Amino acid sequence: MQIRKILLAGAMSLASTGAWAGCAFENTVPLKSLSAGFEAWKAVTDAMAECGNFTAELDQEFREKQPEAFAADPALYQIGGVANSTMVPLLNAGTIRPLDDYIAKYGQQLSANQMIKIDGETYAIAMMVNNQHLMYREDILTDLGISVPTTWDEVLAAAEAIKAAGVVDYPLGGTFKTGWNLGEEFVNNYLGEGGAFFGDGNMPAINNPAGVRALEIMKAMTAYMDPEYLVSDSTYVQQQFQQGKIAMANLWASRAGAMDDAAESQVVGLVKMASAPMGSVRPASSLWWDGVVFATNMTEEEADAAFRVAMEGLDREMVEANNDVAVWLIDGYVPGPAAEGAIATANNGAVPYPASGPMGIMHTALGNGIADYLNGAKDAATTLADIEAAYLTSAKEAGLVE
Amino acid sequence: MKFKTFAAFVAPSVFMMLLFIAFPLVSVFIQSFYVTQPVYETVAVETCTPGFTGQICTTETKSVPRLDDNGKIVEVTRFVGLESYRNVLEPARFWAAVKARSWAALQAIDFWKALRFTLMFTLVTLPLVIGMGLAIAIVINNASRAIRGPVIFVSLLPFIITPVIGALSINWLFRGDGILTAGLEWWLGRDIALFAQAWTIELLMVLYRVWHVAPFAAIVFYAGLQTVNQDSLESALIDGASRWERLRYIIIPHLMPLITFVAIIHLMDTYRVFEEIVGFSSQGHVISLQWLTYDFLKPDQAGNRSISRASASAMLTMIGIVIILVPLLRRTWRDHRGAGA
């Protein structure tokens, strides 16, 4: 008991010394936030905590808690961290509030680009963007006299040359882990081929030449990847890069900083960033954003305080201290070499991830269904037809398709 | 014992069983015949999201759930009969595959693919667990008293480890250039990728499950070995029975009720195989029935989940367990009746 009290007292005093060190005001309303747990969220919530009376919950499974927690009255969290796709259930359920009044009062420093608008009303404040783009070992490409690949054909040709030279274990890495990652790879390539996921009435529309081409690209890549690609997620690919096992991968911008982290990486300074390879129409990538939302079910006083605290978390000071953690949208961000790939991908015309209710189901069906094609159990057309059938069953059960 | 006393002792347990097992089961059973959906409206929505150079605004028709006056999503629940079961079992595709005599087509249907693995896993691990358990129990029993304690402790260790943690450790030991794979590669002098095809993953899963559960069987059998009639063993020894014959004709018949008990528990547990799938992240190659239920239940990013199909799949798993237990239960019942007569 005694020890617990001492520990508690210690924690309290630490908390209070840390409080409002870098915050413009002293927050007196108890606030909580729930968001994903990656580095950028840690930076932002730490900055919010400086205002006092604020607890952050960083949880990689946040998406399973958030809809229920925000539907409670009063909501269990006042501030939520979301991305394109995870905002959909909250918006659909009406559990996040419009922010225009608060922006007028406290949000002068926000740029128009940060405001996520639905029918003209702002429902979320974006803080960073993310996308998958090409990362490559500059030293290997230079040694072999290969120029930086810009299309999938060039990527595959480069992979062949690297394989022949035998300088790394596997020329390519890929976030092909069955489930969300594998689904996202298809989404990127299908968007790159200019495909649309749905027809009228939320009917699936992926069984077409663009879908087949997207699958074929993925299969062609697997020939140059670690044969255990179906268990390889972003962290695994990042480690393969850091340990010098792969030479190229279409990896998340948020992982770019880790390549030059001397504590983990054996290839500091050797990994460079470029645009995602071009599909037939646009880069094989999709644009994502992360940002904050505010619960509908809280008092006006809480909402006011929550918005002000969030603005402190998303200020210039925070960005200056954490410049290379993410591709920030916040004023004061200086894009470094790590952000070059993400920006080039966007400039080449990559489109936002098409988040929606039906897309959530489609993404799951893709993530579960594509492995059969890569394993050779089904051909491309059958795979796509089966994925469409799986989507239809789920969408009917969800009431999205008649 | 008086009935009143008996009832007083049993009542809390019965109440808990009803509350935490019977009622949820009934609820799942009912849910498997109904579907609950939000009422959607199709509206044109303009969405603006950040780009690098400026905002990207798109106008699309979207399905948006209707909200009532209290701001809650309007939902309708309707009776669908066996539709959710049909959606899980996919009988049309099943019969088409059977008629075409195509194993590949059958294995393309999630439920049948999961059933194939679940049955294989259950039936292959059963004799291995019982055999290993018996072997460990006999080793413990024959160990000298001085080291018996430590031997029991060490052989029980695998059973103490949380299943998911155990599966994850195996995953890390063998994945990519994990220590053990690297060791095997060095020993065999060739490149090995254990997570690249289904059969090696299944082999690892079987090995892991046997390693994990055999101690449980061992400790049960060890308890049984303490009650073997020493007189029978001695007379067998005098009659010149070999070690194997003593095991075959005296010890195993004596342990038979315990072997049946372990088999029943093992079948029930193993038919619900789940931790191995998650721990080995094997969904791309191998899935199980319990994983299928979990996958239906897990919300996607947009918050959709298939509760009706999850309920149907859970009921089917339960029916499967009952079917697989029938031979053993019939046997126990027959023995029981025989003993009574």
Image: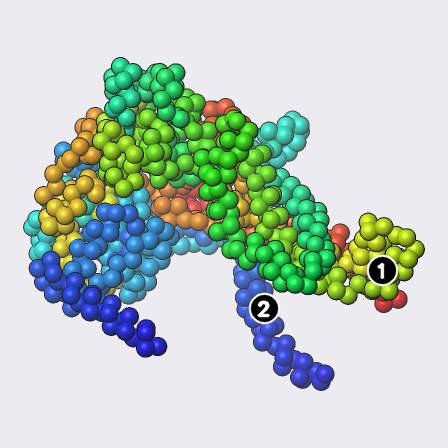
Mark number, residue A307: none
Q: Describe the element under mark 2 as helix, strand or loop.
A: helix
In this view of the protein, which residue sits in the foreground, B193 or A79? B193
Q: Residue at x 36, y 45 (%)?
A: B301
Q: Residue at x 77, y 58 (%)?
A: B255
Mark number, residue B17: 2
> Does residue B290 appear left or right of residue A207 in this picture?
right
Q: Describe the element under mark 1 as helix, strand or loop.
A: helix
Measured Cα–Cα span from mark 1 to mark 2: 43 Å
Nearer to us: label 1 or label 2:
1
- The quadrant in which the C terminus of chain A is found is top left
Looking at the image, residue A74 lies above or below residue A215 = below
Tag 1 near tag 2, CB within 8 Å: no
Residue A271 image point, x, y percent? 25, 29
> Does residue B118 appear left or right of residue A70 in this picture?
right
Badge 2: chain ID: B
Q: Residue at x 79, y 55 (%)?
A: B252
